[in-house]
Image (cartoon, grey):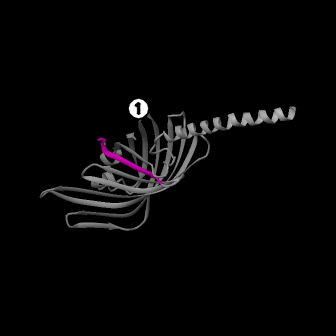
Amino acid sequence: MNTSIINAFRLVLLGVLLPAARSVAVAQTKDIAEQPGIYFPQAPRPGEWRRSLGVVFTSTPPELTEEVRISVPAIDFDLQRGLSKHLFLNARVQSQFVQNNLSLGFRWATPLTERLFVSAGYDVSGWLGALQIKDVFNSQAYGIQHFPNVSAGYRLTKDLQLTTRFETILDSYYHSNVGSLAIDDKQLALNGYAISFILEQPFFKQQHVLIGFRAAYSNFNWQFWSLYDTFDRNLLYPQLLFGFIW
């Protein structure tokens, strides 16, 4: 008799706990899915899109402009699409009208714990710039760069996400011409490295924002191609990032 009562109690307990566990799991999954992030290393659901629109401010190294520090803003648009549970595509457009940059790549992301996520990716970027002043100046340049990267993200709270990303910058093609004088370089070479710290959090209703800092220590930066610097060494290019995510 006691055995029958115990078994019946176990069945009732399982009948209560299992649905409750499913509800908690669904709620946790929903919470995670509702944390849109562009830099945080968590893949969108398969077929899901993520977008961000903002601005990037890049400052010139003092070695290039001496005492004058120029902060160059660029429109920054990111687009992501989930391919699988871990794999997603990434596209990014940066524009300053007279010079533009388009990058395409992929990333593979996975959680290590409930709060810690990591990813590895590879982006290929093409940039183009042109400065033309009639009868005074006629210059164009374009090139291709590669950005293998790894990221680690930590979810500080349910809504607050901090990401650190490390990139290697490789140049595979460079072309420039001033009037009839042209330069071509098709050699794959190490350009430098970059590290970013990005904070992503809610802003208003369903919108989120990203705020971050990126430091590129490189021999060349596409935004300053028109300066034609003569330094054959790496310089520090600091950047401030801000964007709206949806």
**Residue drawn where x is 32% and y is 67% of the image:** 184
Residue on which disc 1 sits = 205
Q: Residue at x 82, y 32 (%)?
A: 5
Image quarter of residue 208:
top left
Q: Residues within 10 Å of mark 1 (few under 14, many from 20)?
A: few
Tag 1: residue type?
Lys
Name the one closer to the observer, 232 or 195. Answer: 195
Looking at the picture, how far across and down is residue 71, in whole percent?
31, 42
Name the residue at 41% across, 32% down.
205
Tell me if residue 83 comes above or below residue 243 in the rendering: below
Residue 143 belongs to the span the image colors magenta = no
Q: Quadrant of residue 228?
A: bottom left
The residue sitting at 27% across, 54% down in the picture is 226
Q: Quadrant of the N terminus?
A: top right
- The outermost residue toward the left is 135
Question: Foreground residue, 54 or 128?
Answer: 54
Of 124 and 237, the residue lying toward us: 124
The magenta-colored residue range is: 67-82
